Image: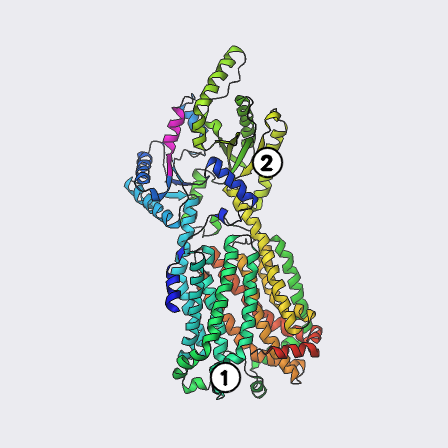
Amino acid sequence: MLPVLGYWASQLRVGTARVESWLPHHSAAIAKYADFVKAFGDDQFLIISWPDCRLDDPRLVDLARLLESAAENNPSLAIEEVQNSLSAIESLANSDAGISPDEASRRLEGRAIGADGTCFLTLRLADADAASRGELLAMIQVSAERAGVPPNSLIMAGEPLQVSTIDRASRETVRYFVAPSSILALAVAFCCLRSVGLTLLVFVFAGIGQLLGLATISLFLGEMSAVLVVLPTLVFMLTLSAAIHLTSYYVEANRCGTACAGVAALRVGIKPCLLATLTTVFGFGSLAVSQLEPVWQFGCLAALGLILSTVVLLLCFPSASTVATLPLLSPKDRGLAGVGVSQSAEASQTTAPSLWKRKLAEWSKRHNLVVTLAGLSLLCFALLGIPQLRTSTEFEDMFPADSPAVSSLRWVQTHLGSIDTLEFVIKFPDPRGDLLERLRWLGALERKLASSEDVESTFSALSFLPQLPEAAGVRGTIQRAILRRTLADRSSELVAAGFLSHVNGGESWRISARMLELRSDTFEQIRDEVLALCQSHLDTSNLETQHPSIDVTGQRSVMETAHQVLLSDLGASFLAAFVLITPVMMLIVRSTICGLILMIPNTLPVAIVFGGMGWLGIRLDVASILTASVALGIAVDDTLHFMNWFTRCRQRGDPVEAAVLGAIDTCARPMLQTTIICTGAMLPFFLSQFLPTSKFALLMILTLSGAIVGDLLLLPAILHGPLGKFFSSPKVADSLRGSGHE
């Protein structure tokens, strides 16, 4: 099995899809953008420049020639067109439109030349894979150096660079953080087990789980996106935790001299392992409700990887523990009792709990009402912060501000202008009227857009055409006739430039508007304001017979749709996880009220983390929505263990105080160890320069740490208080006793 898994894992590629591929194809935003691309071509370019790049800089033309030569000699680079500021201005000035060089520079400001005179090159690219993008960027750097541009002065920005940068960050995450994550988790496991043999046993199963995670991605997708890079480590972490529980049962059985200790350990541990896997799979599976492709892919593949790794663990553990571990066990190992797990109920009767556990139990009893009310109040307050959550898939929010890619983007925004663009598509389904009248109407619309304080500059087909004649009489008639002939001659040029399209007998014109300060929290307001300007112009149109209509689209519109879906998916996935997991809790305790009560300490940490993000204005990214549902599924396991031992103590006749103390004494150590192992596995990813991965690791650590606080502080307080009476009914006690945890 290992060679097969290793082969599949080795075939895995790293690649990041464009944002428009995240959303379902039936999305209105995707459909509108697809129509736009079909009519006018892609609106994404790669921008290349350097400090003090001006029209008289010979390197501008030299680099353009080198890039054109590379495009001809290497079609795999997918370069469709190379343009530079000088050639664009000369082309417009030398056309028959009668435009002077100065007027050409003014018209092309923000499109082919910066407001401060900074010049640049633009590469229009066909869709290509990540490897081609990396090859392209390397070629550009070599060509720039040959043209005399120092490598440390080269500035690049645009969607192709962003995709390549994210791909590189994903590869670096796998290369530099997966191994430290595994080693640190292994070291924590060794500290818990204090045995080389036992540690190797759990590491082998955890490693198989990690390979299964990689293999499932390779088998079903073929490549691993930036969102999926933590999936194998997550499966590794969960498999390692389950293996430690089973290994602890094995040590306990071996200490007691039980024959076939591996089988005995499996008999005791199979039910809690399956329940833990079930709740965690529900947490993963809840992500399947997401409309974003990388999110539901993560949920489905993580659930599949965990199921497969659990099956392997349960099937192979008895023989593996006997064959691999027993020869390595020292007498000290054989004497380990309850290391890393809950001890047996009988042992808990004869072994006095440690001081800190007694203090914790006494404190929860003495302050049960205060702690319960504080927990519920904090839950309500945190929930009020969740509506304040904002999302972001901005490139500059994915990397530190001083990273080269973000610094280049800031430089471009300062010297060349904003690269955030809204594309306005004006359709004339019945363009049988006067073309000059349509152009005059389009010019007025463009001027109205340009007058908005949110618009930096506009660009359209009118930028390539002569000034529209306003004169009357014979002179005006002659000018209009000449212009009509010019338009007929240049129609194909406007189509090739991507500003005019003829589809199904209709006519579509494009106006590109570079926007100022277009962020997620202001996008809808700004878009609605400029659309209102367009609508007011449309309402006063004298072209009713041509039935013009206006749509707004572009890559930025697609990104903002993804933002909205991201936020709605967070609520939907968490609600799905809650709806799936809560009935499991209710069935286990056979009580609706008790099942809901048990969810309080599990939902509280998630609510605090995400509600706190809302109150503090910390933006959600794609990785963030994975955390809530996944952490809820993992956290429930600790609650099940705690309640199992609490109920067993109650069935022995212990009062509530003794039962809570017994549960804390039995469960605190393995619960803390599980959290420490999870933290150890996630901690290296927190150091990643790719901020979504770093944020995912931090949120996982905070949420799981909060779950421990909920289970060791809030849950004991609830059981000591009035709500604890619901768990003392014979029906609930019998159901929990029959669950057979640990």
Q: Residue 542 magenta-drawn? A: no
CA gap, disc 1 and disc 2: 70 Å
Q: Residue furthest left?
A: 146
**Tag 1's secondary structure?**
helix
Q: Amino acid at mark 2?
A: Leu
85 drawn magenta: yes
- Expressed as whole percent of the image width and height from the top left, the position of residue 701 reads 51, 65
Q: Residues within 10 Å of mark 1 (few under 14, many from 20)?
A: many
In screen coordinates, is 603 left or right of 84? right
In the depicted view, which residue is nearer to us: 308 or 471? 308
Q: Is residue 518 visible?
A: no
Q: Is residue 78 left or right of residue 559?
A: left
Looking at the picture, does residue 665 appear above or below residue 144? below
Judge whether 704 appears above or below 95 on screen. below
Q: Nearer the viewer, mark 1 or mark 2?
A: 1
| Number of residues whose C-alpha sits closer than 10 Å to that of mark 2, classed few (under 14), some (14–19) or many (20 or more) | some
Q: Amino acid at mark 1?
A: Glu
Q: Closer to the camera, 250 or 420? A: 250
Picture quadrant of residue 69: top left
Q: Secondary structure at mark 2?
A: helix
Q: Residue at x 42, y 56 (%)?
A: 222
Residue 725, label in figure: none
Residue at the farthest top position: 474
* Residue 289 horizontal/vertical position (percent): 57, 56
The residue at which mark 1 appears reads as 252
Say which residue label 2 marks: 531
Q: Specify whether residue 606 is in view.
A: yes
Rendered-image quadrant of the N terminus: bottom left
Extreme residue toward the front, this view: 504
Instruction: Give left or right: position of 74 versus 739.
Output: left
Magenta span of residues: 80-95
